């Protein structure tokens, strides 16, 4: 067995692989949320998104792109 296969479990647990995997999914989610709510006065969001946004509003973080900024940070 080569050393690459032995190192795989350790290397795959690094945050970079998780970021690479999740970043396109978050980007697609946010783009679709904008498209769904394009001409609507109210926004259609899932429950977890709404709860996190309300929690951030308590601390005064209310910009529309705060979820993406926090995700990257």
Image (cartoon, rainbow, N blue to C red):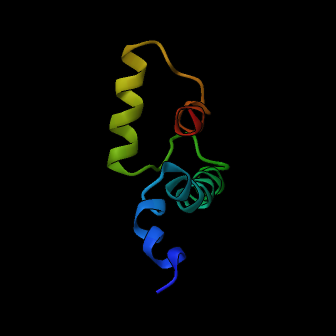
Task: In this rendered view, identify the residue nearer to me: 14 or 24.
Answer: 14
Tell me residue 66's x, y (percent). 56, 30
Q: Residue 58, relative to residue 2: is it above or below?
A: above
- Residue drawn 41% across and 61% down? 10
- Residue drawn 37% across and 28% down? 54
Task: In this rendered view, identify the residue nearer to me: 57 or 19.
Answer: 19
Tell me residue 57's x, y (percent). 42, 20
- Residue drawn 66% across and 48% down? 39
Judged left or right of residue 50, residue 41 is right
Judged left or right of residue 29, residue 60 is left
Residue found at the far bottom of this picture: 1
Tell me residue 38's x, y (percent). 67, 50
Tell me residue 26's x, y (percent). 55, 54
Residue found at the far top of this picture: 60
Q: Residue 3, relative to residue 45: is it above or below?
A: below
Say how many tags the image has.
Answer: 0
Task: In this rendered view, identify the residue nearer to me: 34 or 14.
Answer: 14
Judged left or right of residue 43, residue 39 is right
In which image quadrant can residue 73 be found? top right
Task: In this rendered view, identify the residue nearer to me: 43 or 49.
Answer: 49
């Amino acid at each position: 067995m080569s050393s690459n296969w032995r190192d795989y479990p350790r290397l795959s647990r690094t945050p970079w692989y998780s970021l690479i995997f999740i970043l396109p999914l978050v980007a697609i989610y946010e783009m679709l949320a904008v498209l769904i709510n394009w001409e609507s006065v109210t926004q259609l969001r899932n429950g977890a998104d709404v709860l996190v946004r309300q929690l951030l509003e308590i601390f005064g973080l209310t910009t529309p792109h705060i979820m993406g900024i926090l995700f990257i940070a």
